[in-house]
Amino acid sequence: MRQYWWKVVCVLLLGYTVIAGFLLPVPALDIINETIRNLYFHVPMWFTMIILFLVSAIYAVRYLRTGDLRYDVFSAEFTKVGIFFSILGMLTGMEWANYTWGEPWSNDPKQLGTAISMLTYFAYMVLRGGMKDEEKRAKISAVYNVFAFALMIPLLWILPRMVDSLHPGNGGNPGFNTYDLDSNMRKVFYPAVFGWILLGVWISTLRVRVALYHFKRENEFEFDFEKQMTHA
Amino acid sequence: MYLSPVISLVKKDLLIEWRQKHTLFGVLLYVGATVFAVYMMAGQPETKIWNALFWITQLFVSINSVAKSFLQEHPNRFRYYFTIVHPTQFLLAKMIYSITLLLAMSLVSLLLFSIMLGFPIAQTGLFIAITLVGSISLSSVFTFLSAIAARANQNAALMAVLGFPIVTPVLMMLSNLALKAIAEVYQPGWWALAGTLLLLDVLVIVLGVILFPFLWQE
């Protein structure tokens, strides 16, 4: 991912999302009104979060297969950025729900699902924080990462069948696709999803580069007298 | 051939349990004291609250009793086991042991609940079956997490933190299922829920068997 063209694409897509997302016409609906534009900013956060957690789990598997500590760095940094996006998604969703559902928190299964995945990955960070030894930390947290991710997916799929949903498109509520007759919203929504996912990956790769730099610095072993010899 | 070390490991754990009666009675006392505390707080509540309290009690009892499976062993003893059995055999033995322990404990807590907090259940057999399925799910998840906590040199609190988010949806499914057993009318659709729960148990065990060997290497 050293090429930069996808970063240009990301900036262009997000610029388009912000401009078109606020200016293009949207269907006028009761209660929802202009808040429908939140679709371009809130929903892609979830997609990004899931993608980042998926990448993190894949790197955890790769670490377990190879034992290369750099994969552990990748896994940890993608998780951190995933947590960041889950917080952003939660905040934008609660702000929106405050105006449309009348309260920021209403036990919606998607809110519950996000809360559960946030708790899972907070626990992952706590687990990592408790260990000093690098190899051990990498191995144990990779095992927990894979275990939690593999269990979370079916659980998130089961949850909506346990509680009723208020979300558009669930629990008898019409989804946005039924309002969007002339596909105007789709023209913004799909680019927005790709833009935000690219942004998430971009932030993660930057963090990975910094973390890898620190990792190399710490693992470069040099005796004091060697330093003096080389500098003399 | 494959199962004989598993059986002897389970036997060893149960024998230790029987010989060191103070830990077994400690867990029993924990169950009794918890149910008593719940009774003092709630008295004899209505059906839905009864069900919720029962499953919360199950959660805490499972954390307390399953934590013993890995955390009670001295870390150095793992090296000895490492030399004589395959890791999956060891994990399966620990899972069978903690499932047995939790099955017994959940029957005890069901008995105590029915004595102290009243007995609102209409279909007793079905409710007992759900309790047994519930203890299998809870103990298999927590056994694996206690292995993680033990390897990280941490205590049962970390195991609980790691487990709560995963176990919460399972508990929701269990309490929904149990409510169907409490109702006097036949409730359709409980089979799908029970099947999903069993599939989830299978997934937990398969994941454990795949991942545990990595956890065990030093």
Image (cartoon, grey):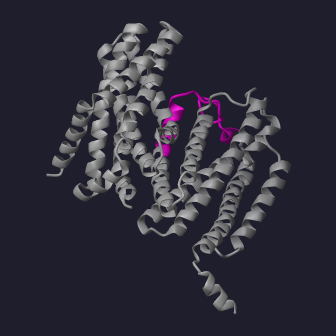
- The quarter of the image holding the N terminus of chain A is bottom right
* Percent coordinates x, y for residue B130 in the rendering: 35, 24
Answer whether residue B18 is magenta in the image: no
* Percent coordinates x, y for residue A167 in the rendering: 65, 34
* Percent coordinates x, y for residue A63 in the rendering: 47, 64
**Outermost residue, right direction?**
A23
Q: Residue at x 50, y 10 (%)?
A: B40
Q: Residue at x 57, y 64 (%)?
A: A73
Answer whether residue A169 is magenta in the image: yes
Please, is residue B175 above or below residue A197 in the view?
above
Q: In terms of depth relative to the viewer, which is nearer, B91 or B185? A: B91
In the drawing, does residue A200 fall left or right of residue B28? right
Start and end of the magenta stretch? A152-179
Task: Work out whether residue B119 can be spotted.
Answer: no
Count of numbered circles in the view: 0
* Percent coordinates x, y for residue A41 in the rendering: 74, 48
Please, is residue B217 above or below residue B143 in the view?
below
- The quarter of the image holding the C terminus of chain A is bottom right
In the drawing, does residue B195 fall left or right of residue A93? left
Quarter of the image for residue B119 reads top left
Q: Residue at x 60, y 37 (%)?
A: A110
Quarter of the image for residue B102 reads top left
Please, is residue B89 above or below residue A134 in the view?
above
Q: In terms of depth relative to the viewer, which is nearer, A128 or B48? A: A128
**Outermost residue, bottom direction?**
A232
